[in-house]
Image: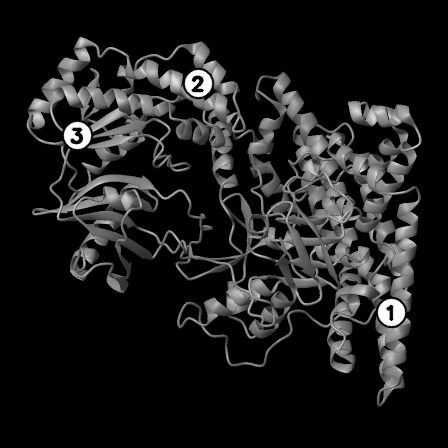
Amino acid sequence: MTGPVLDLREVGAADVAAVGGKGANLGELTRIEGVRVPAGFCVTTAAFPPVPGDQLDRLARLGPADREAVAALSAEIRQAVEAAEIPAELAAAVTEAVVRHGAQEPYAVRSSATAEDMPTASFAGQQDTYLGVRGVPAILEHIRRCWASLFTERAVLYRRRNDVDHRRVGMAVVVQRMVDARSSGVLFTADPITGNRKVATVDAVPGLGEDLVAGLVNPDNFRVRDGAVVSRLIAGARPALTDRQVVDLVRLGRRIEARFGRPQDIEWCLGDDGFQVVQSRPITTLFPVPETSDGANHVWLSTGHQQMMTDAMKPLGLSVWQLTAMTEFQVAGGRLFVDSTKMLTSPARAAFLEMVGRGDPLFRDALDTLLARDGFLPEPPAAPAAPLAPPAAPVDPDPAIVSELVSRAEASLATLKRDIAGKAGAELFDFLLAAFEEHKKLLTDPLSMQAIMAGMGATWWLNDHLEQWLGERNAADILTLSAPGNVTSEMGLALLDVADAIRPHPHLLAALRNGSLHEIDALRAYLDRYGMRCAGEIDLTRPRWSERPETLVPLILDNIKLFEPGAGHRRFEQGRRQAEAKRAELLDRLRALPDGAAKADETDRMIDRLRAFIGYREYPKYNIVSRYLVYKLALLAEADRLVEAGALGDREDIYFLTFDELRTGGFDDRLIRQRREEFRAHQALKPPRVLTSEGEAIEGTHRRAGAPDGALVGVPVSAGTVEGRARVIRDMAEADLEAGDILVTAFTDPSWSPLFVAITGLVTEVGGQMTHGAVIAREYGLPAVVGVPGATTLIPDGSRIRVHGTAGYVEILS
């Protein structure tokens, strides 16, 4: 491969560095039997005029917030590129290619960057394309314009968002004969809306498709499944394609998809001699599908939605979770999923759906939507419905049970810390595998499971029966206030005590503000107790508070600003008194009913059970992350040894390896670089609640009447109504709260609990009745609505909102 110009038939998928993503894909298309590509050539990246290194260095230092500086420097570079002289060798090669393909014909001149049309980022529309260009002088001029479009402001910012180095991107240019098209458009070999890989969609318009790409016209739309058009929407008087042509086009697309190994976004034209393909790129927005080998239909549920952490996880975090979990998990898109197919096709389907719906109604609705379709999953056998698990023996509401469980867990943790000390290499990995088995035994302790289910069961019993008997909705919310033994709610109140310790001492407040955190004894003691926590803590690779204590500084400063000394103790006592008063009120009302004495006695016993066990609901997670920190520190010490031996470049490279790869040494720099790129791509994906083996993502909807027009509907998880300023916060470390603020965020795991003491209400996009944010909101008495789709985008930061925690909706007031 030589020279600055290469014919499309000379290049293929391996030549991205020379001809960019678009050129390489077009060259590969020419090699597929039955696929026709307009003739043309590529001006290679080697011909691109050099940009001074100091300009690229300056550009690399600018962030997305530096819009004006990015615009000015990008314009400076573009002007220099457009003014560059075309070398004589390049001009001659372009002239020869144009003459060979037809000197009088119109051409499309199209940018083809090396970071374009990649499996992880398409960069669609970031560089320029010019149509109908005639003659060598005009073609050379438009080649320069394509070069310059590598540095449009939008392209620079897009690369920045995708962590692509400006200095490592090359620009080629594709020059192709134009097609005299009767119609043209776009074919997606998977449904870009639902993700279904078995449904192809075709958009078609008469003539050339530039108006379609620019969004200036409405296309005809066809959906095709199993070789037949299953729906059509015709925009004009006559369709741009017949059904037969649509089916033929999709059949062509399936061949292209098979060649590239993933669903494709294909631009096509229909001329007098049939279809021609002018571009094919991967559809990068589709969520990956877990691998299966049985050929049957499967349904997966998102673990991230259940664990209140929908961010992508790194490979080491994923693999450690899989090795320490009670259930088998599949990985897709950097997230964990559980295969629910077996339960959905068993006699226990109804009980399983009931359990899922109690946790998150959106899961239930998504599954009901799927199961309503004929034939996707077989119906359960016509047998008596079996319970999901043998009924647990009743647990007396004895606080000593919780104390015993906590003592067992703490003893096991102390043994782990003692026995792991000094272990390295193969001995360490063998020890960890044994520790993971002990980890799972703790999670499956029958008494622990009984205690958890006792608290949850009491919550459901009280809510169901007190609504039936008294019309009292979500009665357990108030009865849960300041329940004893909740390590997560205690963690938030304990940070108020840290603020109390700092507030009277100017030198400690100065130390907090300047980052001298080691000088603050109260903070060190707090980290000794809670330093294993962090946002996204189910991912072992996420930085813990003990590793980055500065994360807590904004929260402590807010506590100092918003609260008087002793607020933690007062808040707990106030909640306890409210719960006791609610108990007395409910029992009095019950005794006035027919058979009221029996109802009151049964309710009183259930309240005892609730308050004895609901706090323990948070302890197993605390124990998990406590053990995770021990595992992590040991693995990082092993990583330091590997860095010292030259096997790793950086200790955090281990985050991009699985536990088994790290244990066996099955890795190299190339694999780590590949995993980093994959992780960046996964971060941009939104995981679905429910995912099928056809690739369809199903979110579910709230089907509840009674909310006002325009209200955002979710799951009511903590009773009460509150009005205040919405603070949309995506990173806890960026919190800056005022009195009366309502937190609006995507999800909250236990690490967010210290923030809860400073807010008056909670709205999240993810969650259900028994997820961590809901439990803590109830214990703190915060009206809360969770599972509100799109809350962080639909609710403007700083707007005034009203949260209806009993009815389950949010009103945007201004």
Q: Is residue 624 visible?
A: no
Q: Secondary structure at mark 3?
A: helix
Q: CA distance from mark 1 to mark 3?
A: 79 Å
Q: Quadrant of residue 39?
A: top left
- Please say if 307 is above or below 115: below
Q: CA distance from mark 1 to mark 2?
A: 65 Å
**What amino acid is found at the position of numbered circle 1 in the picture?**
Lys
Q: CA distance from mark 2 to mark 3?
A: 37 Å
Residue 20 placement (x, y as % from top left): 30, 27
Residue 241 placement (x, y as % from top left): 17, 56
Return the disc, 1 or 3, that comes first in the chain's sequence: 3
Residue 555 placement (x, y as % from top left): 77, 38
Tell me the quadrant of the picture where the N terminus can be found. top left
Q: Which mark is residue 73?
A: 2
Q: How many marks?
A: 3
Q: Which residue is mark 1?
A: 582
From the viewer's perspective, tell me whether residue 797 is left or right of residue 19: right
**What amino acid is found at the position of numbered circle 2 in the picture?**
Leu
Choose between 484 and 288: the one closer to the eye.
484
Q: Which residue is mark 3?
A: 9
Mark 2 or 3, which is nearer the eye?
Answer: 2
